[in-house]
Image (tube, helix red, strand yellow):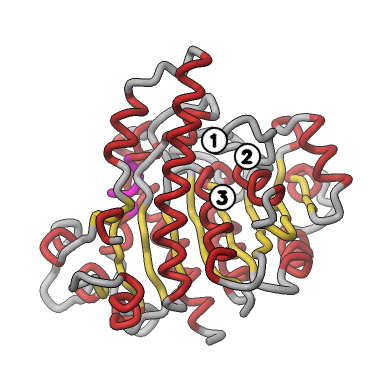
Amino acid sequence: MQNLLHIFDRPFVESHTSIREGEHKIGQTIALLDHEGDLVDALRDCNVKFALIFVPEDIGVRANLGRPGASKTWEPALRGICNLQDNYYLSGAEMLLLGALDVDDLMNEADKADATTPEGIAKLRELTSQVDDRLRTILAQIYKADIFPIIIGGGHNNSYPNLVSWCDVHDSVLSCINLDPHADYRNMEGRHSGNGFRYAHEEGGLDRYAVVGLHEGYNSRSMVDELRHDPDLRYSTFEDIAVRRIQTFEQAVVDSLDFVSEGPFGIELDLDAIPRIPVSASTPTGFSLEQARHYVHLAASRPESVYLHICEGSAGLAEDRLLPELSKTIASLVADGIKAKRNID
């Protein structure tokens, strides 16, 4: 099982930590997987509530005709998390830094695929399915150990294994809330970053689905029609919230949470929703980082929440001056999720 993971050791983690005398950083105190064998047993032995796993791929983004770069986000994200202070508000002892999904071979194959040809697109979509299988396997083990996974991508294609891996373990189906300019509910035309929720819903791995902050100009008529007419689906638009101000941001989030939280649900956050940070599909208009953080807090505060997924950050497209912003953005969202979830347990 561990052969699907690049497991991080302490010297590697501390190499991403700015150590200062008299301070304790999360990179110095966070739990690490320290023995071979059955992954579920190893996870239980760590005695933690949260497990962080990175998915260093952008195959699903490319398969959706998007720009590569999300595969490089894991390292600045790791650096941001490691350099949070271990203090009264957040402790490394309550979380496990599991490592990164091993997709090196799939990324190498993706680099050979020509995304301008039908054959290349088909290859990228087949490779995305292989990413699905690997992440699905690891997440099922985390769920079996009764640990809350925090998944840091990578493309939004990984919503699919996040959801269906729960069904592999439990006698229940997840619902989901998603802060995102795009519904990612495109046709089932082969797996990619734009149809993870559609595949999960059609295959019975997703019950209710609510999107907060949909951008009206960037979702197709057919997709919006699906959202409008399927009683299991719900959305609010960015324009209704921020432009016409028909409802507040908090009202939109709370209404969506009430819709999905009758049973267990996952928390999805596409960094495309936040302007002026490097992402796969950038936008000049969107929600503030403070609103995104409040969204994570509200969602993780619900006892029915079972995972947090932060995706579509694109360090590969970032100027050097923007990398610290991306790093701290992801670290803040991770910390907010842990604090909110811990306080209800």
Give how far across and how far down residue 71 sits, in percent. Answer: 36, 39
Nearer to me, 285 or 110: 110
The amino acid type, in three-letter code, at marker 3 is: Tyr
Label 1 neighbourhood size at 10 Å, few (<14), some (14-19), many (20+)? many
Give how far across and how far down residue 136 sits, in percent. Answer: 46, 56
Q: Secondary structure at mark 3?
A: helix
Question: Do the residues under discs 3 and 2 have CB atoms within 8 angstroms?
Answer: no
Give left or right: position of 88 versus 15.
right
Residue 192: which numbered mark, if any?
Answer: 1
Query: What's the CA distance linking mark 1 and mark 3?
Result: 10 Å
Residue 266: which numbered mark, if any?
Answer: none
The amino acid type, in three-letter code, at marker 2 is: Asn
Whether 70 is drawn above or below 138: the answer is above
Residue behind mark 3? 160
Whether 121 is drawn above or below 238: the answer is above
Q: Earlier in the sequence, mark 3 or mark 2?
A: 3
Label 3 neighbourhood size at 10 Å, few (<14), some (14-19), many (20+)? many
Give left or right: position of 265 versus 37.
right
Dominant secondary-structure state across the stretch colored magenta: helix
Identify the residue at horizontal 58%, vertical 34% (top origin): 284
Residue 195: which numbered mark, if any?
Answer: 2
The amino acid type, in three-letter code, at marker 1 is: His
Query: What's the CA distance linking mark 3 and mark 2?
Result: 8 Å
Whether 178 is drawn above or below 298: the answer is above
Q: Which region of the structure is painted magenta?
A: 72-77
Give left or right: position of 256 versus 182.
right
Query: What's the CA distance linking mark 2 and mark 1?
Result: 6 Å
Question: Do the residues under discs 2 and 1 have CB atoms within 8 angstroms?
Answer: yes
Q: Is residue 35 magenta?
A: no
